[in-house]
């Protein structure tokens, strides 16, 4: 018998990336399938193709640092079981250049938090005399703001940067600090009598967030030492001790 199946070439896969389906022409040359011997050849089958598989690349993230060397990343996903060609980079070096990288300024408010009188300062050292000259009321500081990623302020209880008097000091990095923040970091009684403002590219976040709260001498102790009655009482007690000692020596 000349009856036979006529089978064509497979068509291209229905997709260029991933799983799909492909077909081919199949017919019996006698017209009806039952005139051809054997089972009818399949006319469709599943297929897989990667020629059109591409990488889906997302947007770069912001640099991991606001200032200086850092890293940035992006999503890179193969849209299929396999992608041809080199995989695009998902990480890269970057340099943070936030506006605050080069800034260094300290703003000080008095009266109420971020309200009332206000003064701004550039980097430098400011004693109580300097502050009074600029009109800052040292015993009425309610809040402050440090502007600059590498800007650091150290404030002192006394107007001479605590050189002659032991007192508290506290450090502040970039940020805004209300009256409660000042107290929690060691700046007490709304009283900042001197401070230093510096721009330090090497200072770490941990260093910039610390504060030092050395104790001020007790006002009660100072008052008692300065009290004339206290001095007279101490002198009288010393006289009694000396008299007893001399009496003992005269007997021996």
Image (cartoon, grey):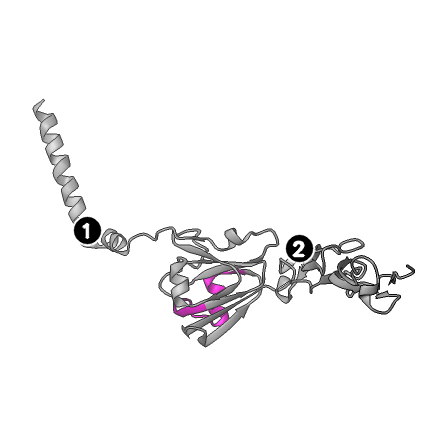
Name the residue that disc number 1 marks: 230
Q: Using the numbered discs, state the Cα–Cα distance from disc 2 to disc 1 in whole angstroms.
A: 67 Å
- Pick the front one: 103 or 250: 103
Q: Is residue 129 magenta?
A: yes
- Pick the front one: 84 or 15: 15
Looking at the rendered image, the quarter that the N terminus falls into is bottom right
Name the residue that disc number 2 marks: 71
Identify the element where label 2 is drawn.
strand
Q: Nearer the viewer, mark 2 or mark 1?
A: 2
Q: Residue at x 10, y 33 (%)?
A: 244
Q: Is residue 195 magenta?
A: no
Looking at the rendered image, the quarter that the C terminus falls into is top left
Which of disc 1 and disc 2 is earlier in sequence? 2
Q: Residue at x 72, y 62 (%)?
A: 57
Spot occupied by residue 165 in the image (x, y as percentages of width and height): 39, 52
Task: Specify the segment rendered in magenta.
Answer: 125-143
Spot occupied by residue 247 in the image (x, y as percentages of width and height): 9, 30
Identify the element where label 1 is drawn.
helix
Residue 182 vertical placement versus 240 (above, below): below
Q: Is residue 47 visible?
A: yes
Residue lying furthest right = 2
Q: Quadrant of residue 46?
A: bottom right
Residue lying furthest bottom = 116
Label disc, if present, on residue 44 of the rendered structure? none
Spot occupied by residue 73 in the image (x, y as percentages of width and height): 67, 58
């Amino acid at each position: 018998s000349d009856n036979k199946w006529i089978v064509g070439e497979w068509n291209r896969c229905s997709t260029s990336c991933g799983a799909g389906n492909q077909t081919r022409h199949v017919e019996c040359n006698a017209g009806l399938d039952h005139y051809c011997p054997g089972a009818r050849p399949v006319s469709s089958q599943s297929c897989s193709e990667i020629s059109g598989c591409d990488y889906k690349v997302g947007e770069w993230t912001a640099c991991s640092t606001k200032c200086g060397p850092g890293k940035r990343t992006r999503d890179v996903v193969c849209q299929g079981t396999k992608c041809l060609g080199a995989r695009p980079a998902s990480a890269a070096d970057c340099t943070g250049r936030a506006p605050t990288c080069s800034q260094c300024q300290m703003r000080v408010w008095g009266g109420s938090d971020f309200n009332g009188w206000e003064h701004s300062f550039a980097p430098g050292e400011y004693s109580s005399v300097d502050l009074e000259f600029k009109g800052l009321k040292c015993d009425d500081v309610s809040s402050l703001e440090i502007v600059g990623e590498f800007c650091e302020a150290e404030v002192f209880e006394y107007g001479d940067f605590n050189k002659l008097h032991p007192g508290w000091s506290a450090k502040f990095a970039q940020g805004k600090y209300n009256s409660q923040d000042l107290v929690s970091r060691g700046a007490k009684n709304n009283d900042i009598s001197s401070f230093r403002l510096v721009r330090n590219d090497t200072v770490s976040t941990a260093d910039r967030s610390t504060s030092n709260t050395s104790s001020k001498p007790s006002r009660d102790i100072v008052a008692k030492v300065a009290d004339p009655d206290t001095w007279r009482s101490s002198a009288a007690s010393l006289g009694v001790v000396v008299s007893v000692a001399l009496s003992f020596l005269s007997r021996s």
